[in-house]
Image (cartoon, coloured by chain):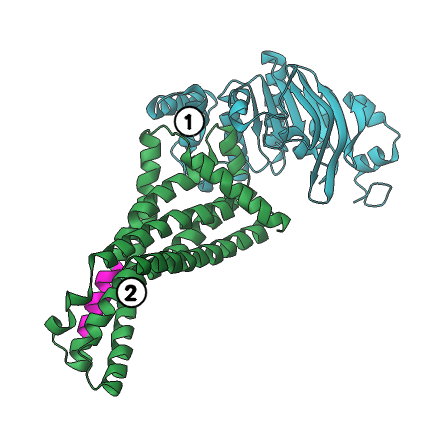
Amino acid sequence: MIEFKNVSKAFGDRQILKGVSLTVDAGKVLFVIGKSGAGKSVLTKHVVGLVRPDSGAVLFDGVDVSSWTEEQFYPLRKRCTMVLQHSTLFDSMTIVENVALPIRKHRQLGWNAALETATSYLNDVGMAEYAKRMPDTLGDGLRKRIAIARALALQPQCVIFDEPTTGLDPQSAIQVDGLIRSLADRFSVTCIVVSHDLRSIFSIADRVVMLYQGQVLLDGPADVFRRSEHPVVKQFMSGVPDGPMEL
Amino acid sequence: MSAQTRVFLGNMAFVIKKMMGRKKTDRASRLRFWSALNDVGINSVFFIVITLGFVGTIMMLHGGYQAARIIGDSNLVGPQILPLMIRQLGPTLAGLMVATRVGTGMAARIGSMVVTEQVDALRLSNACPVNYLITPSWHAALVMVPILSIFGITAAFFSGMLTAYVVFETAPGVYADWSFVSGLDAVEALIKSISFGAVIPLIAGTCGLSTHGGSAGVGRATTNAVVLSSLAVIILDFFIGALILGLR
């Protein structure tokens, strides 16, 4: 469904990705892991056109999207959406307006019709009580859940989650993990999860890809990752500061 | 040309292209425009009236003192400063005040939305960040900067008149001698204020969208916005003024 072919990306002098090649299977949960600054978010943002590769290709359903214009990405972003790291709710809008905005823009609905759809969606996911609140009155956990609800309101085929459990309490993190797993199992939604959370990786990942120094260091099921003898992988797992991994 | 300048100019070309494209007007976009009118206009009125009011007083006070000292008559000062207020100080100071108050606010707001990925979230929602964040302020500034200039000129006129009466005992009728004011002064003021209204949101919005590097980046974007838009106001002021002087 999604394929990265030899993707390279640099910001100024800093080379983030160095020829990453990777195929993402439809309806599965793929975790992209690596130390901070390894290029996990940059890699996944290529899929929805938030970042364009310097070289290489990104294929979505076999179509090369790497040189698409912003307008060409509009329909793709309905099929494949992203929950960004900072639970990016718009500060100037109420919760229901936040959820209504992509519904209105992607489905070309009027504002009132989009608000109605968003309200019913918030009702379905048990968050209707927050509909009229402003984002700054909610905690990080709730904001993150609403950002996820906003992405799912488009009923996408693929969702990219950028550190979905970071900053959440353990119960909320387990709920988010369960939601991601059920999206793949019940609705065959392809889920790409950028995360450092080992508990999430071992509980819901179908496959793990580890990025290191701009390249794929490891690619396989969670068990392969767990049993890896590679010193960098072992250091990442153990979390100790001393080791071969460049910090 | 540095890489940063190239990126900024590229972003500005992108912003202009997006703003010139055809847009659908709906209730939401009208609401954003009204909100921007309020932000650019209503919230700036007090600031501009106070500033220009003091400028009118200062000009009359110092102009009157100098005139009394040199030619022994301060009555000529009012008719001399009126055209200057209309074509020069009113629009330019209103433009600089809008650049300071609205430009910095815009750059900080958009810049913080960039670093917290809210702009990416807008793009994912199929909402064009330029149309969403810059165009309403641009339209509002086109309308409001001329209106704010009129408010500023009026405040400067009356404060100057009061100063002339209280300090120099100049009769209001003598102060308000319009014989030196021509229609071209009003045209110049209008052209300048519309031009300032066009460039300030454009520069501030581009600075905001060009933000990178966290909160330090937001600080840099805000500083750049006020410096560049103030410079643009002064440079436009010179060129428009010189062009119209050539027509006189």
Secondary structure at badge 2 equals helix
Amino acid under label 2? Answer: Leu
- The residue where tag 2 is placed is B52
Q: Which image quadrant is residue B159 in?
A: bottom left
Task: Work out whether disc 2 and disc 1 sit on a shared chain.
Answer: no
The reply to whether the C-beta atoms of the residues labelled 2 and 1 are less than 8 Å apart is no
A112 above or below B162? above
Residue A130 drawn in magenta: no
Q: In this rendered view, identify the residue nearer to me: A122 or B172.
A: B172
Q: Which image quadrant is residue A30 in?
A: top right
Estimate the spatial distance between the alpha carbons at disc 2 and disc 1, rounded to whole Å: 44 Å
Amino acid under label 1? Answer: Ala
- The residue where tag 1 is placed is A100
B71 above or below A138? below
Residue A50 image position (x, y, % from top left): 59, 32
- Within 10 angstroms of label 1, few (less than 14), some, or many (20 or more) residues? many
Q: In this rendered view, identify the residue nearer to me: B223 or A89.
A: B223
Q: Quadrant of the C terminus of chain A?
A: top right
Residue B72 image position (x, y, % from top left): 21, 86
Residue B32 image position (x, y, % from top left): 35, 38
Secondary structure at badge 1 equals helix
Q: Residue at x 38, y 23 (%)?
A: A114
Q: Is residue B239 left or right of residue A175?
A: left
- Of all chains, the one bearing label 1 is A
A247 above or below A206? below
Residue B114 image position (x, y, % from top left): 53, 42
A63 above or below A162? above
Range drawn in magenta: B152-162
Magenta stretch secondary structure, dominant: helix
